[in-house]
Image (tube, rainbow, N blue to C red):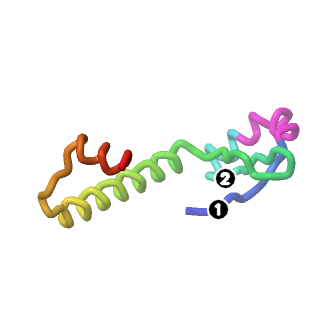
Amino acid sequence: METVTTTLTTRELRSQLSEVIGRAMYGHERVGITRNGKLSAVVISVDDLELLEQFETAQDVAAYRAAKSEDDGTRVSLTEVRSQLHG
């Protein structure tokens, strides 16, 4: 995946919203939006969003599998956890 290709201020975004959406949708650009000089949001295409969601899901599945393989089968009750926290 590409990184942010262009940045605009929120003021610029207001006047160019239709163009920005088109650039993200058809050009697959990632347009960064800045507020007070700091990157605060990014406009991306639906395709990019779906790819990011697939990536997150794959990471979640990998983490679950790793945790499951490391599980030793022992459990701690809620009462035990509370007593350890409140010592």
Residue 63 position, x and y percent, is: 31, 60
- Residue lying at the far front in this picture: please name it: 87
Q: In the structure shown, which secondary structural element does the residue marked by tag 2 occupy?
A: loop
Front in this rendered view, residue 35 or 48: 35
> In whole angstroms, how far apart are the C-alphas of marks 2 and 1?
7 Å
Residue 68 position, x and y percent, is: 20, 59
Front in this rendered view, residue 60 or 22: 60
Indicate whether 29 appears above or below 20.
below
Residue 84 position, x and y percent, is: 32, 51
Which numbered disc, 2 or 1, marks the residue that appears first in the sequence? 1
Residues rendered magenta in the picture:
10-20
The structure residue drawn at horizontal position 80% and vertical position 47%, both measured from the top left corner, is: 34
The quadrant in which residue 22 appears is top right
The structure residue drawn at horizontal position 29% and vertical position 55%, both measured from the top left corner, is: 61
Q: In the structure shown, which secondary structural element does the residue marked by tag 1 occupy?
A: loop
Q: What numbered label is drawn on residue 3?
A: 1
Q: What numbered label is drawn on residue 79?
A: none
Residue 7 position, x and y percent, is: 79, 53
Find out whether residue 13 is within the magenta segment.
yes
Q: What numbered label is drawn on residue 30?
A: 2
Amino acid found under the numbered disc labelled 1: Thr
The quadrant in which residue 77 appears is top left
Count of numbered badges drawn on the protein: 2
Amino acid found under the numbered disc labelled 2: Arg
Left or right of 72, for residue 35: right
The structure residue drawn at horizontal position 65% and vertical position 46%, both measured from the top left corner, is: 24
